[in-house]
Structures are given as C-alpha cells and as structure tokens.
C-alpha cells in the first residue's frame, strides 16, 4: 500500500528536485520503519494476551507502509537518475523490466506456495531486485 500510493508523489518530487532528497527520505524511512518492526517483534505479545493489541497492530501497519514508501522512493530516484544518465538506452528498459519481473515472480511465488519450489522463487526475486540496483549504479 505504501509504495502504490506514494509512487506518483515521489515521481513528481524526483522530476522537480532531483534524486538526492528522495534518497535521503528513503534512507530515513527505511531505517526508521525496519527499526520499528524490529522493536515490535522484540517485545512480542504481553504475557496474558492471545492476540495483538490494536495499537501495536496499527504501529506494525504504519511501519510496513513506511517500508513500501522507502522502497518506492529508492526505486524512483534510481530509475530517474539512470534515465537521465543514459537517455535512449536499453539500460533504463532493462531496469524497468527487472522491477516488473520481480513483481511477476512474487505473484508466482505466492501462487506456488505449497510446492517445494518456493525457495527458488524467493531466490529469483532477490536476484532480480539486486540486479536492478546494480544496473542503476
């Protein structure tokens, strides 16, 4: 949800202000959200609770939305700087293809969850994500 809702806003920011501000925001968003998730998981459930309290659940949803926003900001900045560095090049097309392929493989991994090949889908998704960052730099 965080990445889908924030992508148009981040695209506008990166076009008008450049990628530096967006990368700094992505860093702050990702570091704070992953720290918040770790904190929530370290504390766990209270002793007498059988379900997650509403406030904790809301904080977890907020942290996960910030992860999506930070990821979207990092991708927007990297794709924008790559497109400006290599105009009319296959590099930008390759990066966007890798990002879309990552999403496709994530859906296939979700569909194929019960089989023994689930770990292979996760490895493919991880490699596609890393390849897209490598091609950006």
Image (tube, rainbow, N blue to C red):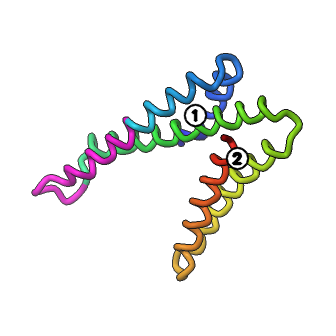
Q: Tell me residue 1's x, y (percent).
A: 54, 42
Query: What is the CA distance from the residue labelled 2 to the residue labelled 1?
Result: 17 Å
Residue 115 magenta-drawn? no
In which quadrant of the rendered view does residue 5 lie? Answer: top right
Q: Which mark is residue 135?
A: 2
Q: Tell me residue 109's x, y (percent).
A: 59, 68
Q: Which mark is residue 73?
A: 1
Nearest the viewer among 75 and 3 is: 75
Task: Establish if 37 lies above or below 123.
Answer: above
Task: Establish if 122 lies above or below 63.
Answer: below
Task: Determine the residue located farthest toward the right in the rendered image.
Answer: 88
Q: Secondary structure at mark 2?
A: helix
Q: Tell me residue 54's x, y (percent).
A: 28, 44
Question: Dot 2, how many residues are within 10 Å of its Cα: few (below 14), some (14-19), or many (20+)?
Answer: some
Nearest the viewer among 14 and 58 is: 14
Task: Determine the residue located farthest toward the top in the rendered image.
Answer: 17
Dot 2 or dot 1: first in sequence order is: 1
Residue at (64%, 68%) from the top-left corner? Answer: 108
Residue at (26%, 45%) from the top-left corner? Answer: 39
Split into 4 quadrants, where in the image is the C terminus? top right
Q: Tell me residue 50's x, y (percent).
A: 19, 60
Q: Which mark is residue 132?
A: none
Q: Is 87 positioned to the left or the right of 2 in the image?
A: right
| Range of magenta residues | 32-51
């Amino acid at each position: 949800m965080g990445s889908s809702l924030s992508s148009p806003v981040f695209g506008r920011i990166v076009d008008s202000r450049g990628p530096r501000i967006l990368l700094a925001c992505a860093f702050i968003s990702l570091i704070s959200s992953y720290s918040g998730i770790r904190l929530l998981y370290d504390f766990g459930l209270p002793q007498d609770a059988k379900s997650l309290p509403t406030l904790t659940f809301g904080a977890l949803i907020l942290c996960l939305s910030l992860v999506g926003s930070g990821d979207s900001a990092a991708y927007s900045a990297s794709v924008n700087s790559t497109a400006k560095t290599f105009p009319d090049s296959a590099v930008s097309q390759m990066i966007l293809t890798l990002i879309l392929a990552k999403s496709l493989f994530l859906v296939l991994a979700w569909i194929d969850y019960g089989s023994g090949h689930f770990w292979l889908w996760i490895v493919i998704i991880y490699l596609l994500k890393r390849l897209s960052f490598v091609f950006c730099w």
